Amino acid sequence: MKLDSMYQDIILDHYRNPHGKGLRDGDVEVHHVNPTCGDEITLRVKLDGPTVVDVSYESQGCSISQASASVLNDLVVGKTVGEAQAVQEAFLELMQSKGQGEGDEEVLEDAVAFAGVSKYPARVKCALLSWMAWKDATAQALAQHPAVND
Amino acid sequence: MTHTFTGLLDTDAIRKDFPVLQRLLHDDKPLVYLDNAATSQKPRQVLEALTAYYERHNANVHRGVHVLAEEATALYEGARDKVAAFVNAPSRNEVIFTKNASESLNLVANMLAWAEEPYRVDADSEIVITEMEHHSNIVPWQLLSQRSGAKLKWFGLTDEGRLDLSNIDELITEKTKVVSFTLVSNLLGTVNPVETIVRKAQSVGALVVIDASQAAPHMVLDVQALEADFVAFTGHKMLAPTGIGVLWGRQELLEDLPPFLGGGEMIETVTMGSSTYAPAPHKFEAGTPPIAQAVGLGAAIDYLQGIGMEKIAAHEHAITEYAVERLLEVPDLRIIGPRTAVDRGAAISFTLGDIHPHDVGQVLDEQGIAVRVGHHCARPVCLRYGIPATTRASFYLYSTPGEVDALIDGLHHVRNFFG
């Protein structure tokens, strides 16, 4: 095992200096936990029409889950919901690749650094925690404002 | 710095009995197995007993007249004799085989749910547990409380990781029907003051249930000395296979209390209208039991007694004393639980600065060191101390001072990695 394949410098940088951390105004708030390790995230999504204008969060957990939330913020804020969902699906596919996927850097940017994490089944949930929370919150926000889907 | 050890076992010899301890991980790293509170490794003697059972004696128990059925029954019931002797039970009929300690504790809770007076737990009753219980000694009582209307109360914890007994007179009252607590905490390592709690419980006529899952593998367990009514433990933490647990109960209680699971083996006669039940312990062992696993538990007890539980306890005490001393040398390390080896078992939980336990465990694994990370099925303890999770190193009869040193070196490496 090569530990560096999991703890890429990009991941450790996001862990030490998370982007967009802290709770700000949002349309919907969700709270997700990973019961196996106790990682938790409270996440808010703010939409403006079809655009994701903010994803804010408070979280506690391991470096992988913390870095993943930071990368999520980078990747989805400013995109349309549709574009952001495509990124989320690409990230999910990468994390489910059991170490086989590399990820499309055009789509996933810094998130391709998590490719190594996909080899460790116990850690995949850490990487996905914030993304699943975002998916849940976005679905709830869309349900409140169905016009966004138009 | 030199440390003087007294009472260490001959681990060179012992470790030869455990095939998995010879493994190299990540190409060339010797396995340093420090996750014994989760499950122990198995010696060859236990593995051979399992193989011999399946290769030579396998049959269902208590129902055939053929040779194999008689041999299997003798082996299964022989394991019961070994358990009875191991815990100093007054009678072998007080030893009920279950699949694990969780099932044992759920069995007690369900006996009391369906019991007649004076044992029945109902809306006027109170149940007392502690904040340091494993989920397996919390959730069955929560279920009983929700279903019966009984009030669930619990002892809190001191900052030092001990039970706070200051309000024992308010907690255990005339309304208390059952007091259930762990002998040794799986997270904190604390060894609890059994006598104080048992005396108080007896004074109000409450039943006492002791979760000995973290005690039975590590120390002399004498159910008569404990003066409890029920004692639960599991085999896999004491060198035996998974799938076999024990509930010891006082004979008169087992006679009075109703069965929980119904099925084959637990009956005397059955008609379409009703059934009568076999005497204990069979009344509580519905269905084909874990036969090979019980035989494996018997072999594990033989192995442990061959070394001696006092000697095992002394060895672990020496290792724990050294581990506490060395862990406290690591900067930013906080032990969650007693910072001493006095009245403490060989499971030591800690946090390391703000490095998450998952990351600690992952980097230790890289060095071949197996520890447990998370809340250890004792989440209320983490909440009590304001932490999301801990890293836990737990030792056993084959653990060595060198493995403690490897852990300390590993933790320094973790700090450098995330520093």
Image: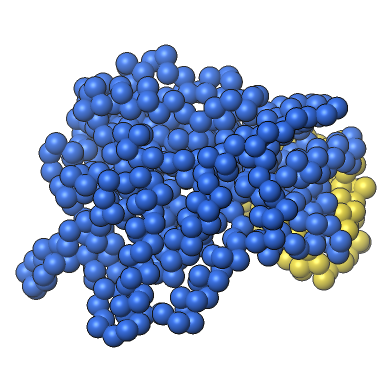
Give the side of residue B341 with respect to residue B88, left or right: right
Give the side of residue B59 with respect to residue B266, left or right: right
Quarter-wise, where is residue B151 in the image?
Answer: top left
Quarter-wise, where is residue B67 in the image?
Answer: bottom left
Q: Position of residue A33 (x, y in %)?
A: 61, 44
Give the tally of numbered discs: 0
Q: Could you tell me which quadrant the C terminus of chain A lies in?
A: bottom right
Q: Which residue occupies the foreground of this view, A77 or B227?
A: B227
Q: Position of residue B153 (x, y in %)?
A: 36, 28
Quarter-wise, where is residue B92 in the image?
Answer: bottom left
Q: Is residue A39 above or below residue A127?
A: above
Q: Residue at x 76, y 68 (%)?
A: A98
Chain displayed in blue: B
Give the side of residue B36 with respect to residue B130, left or right: right
Q: Which residue occupies the foreground of this view, A14 or A86?
A: A14
Q: Is residue B364 above or below residue B199?
A: below
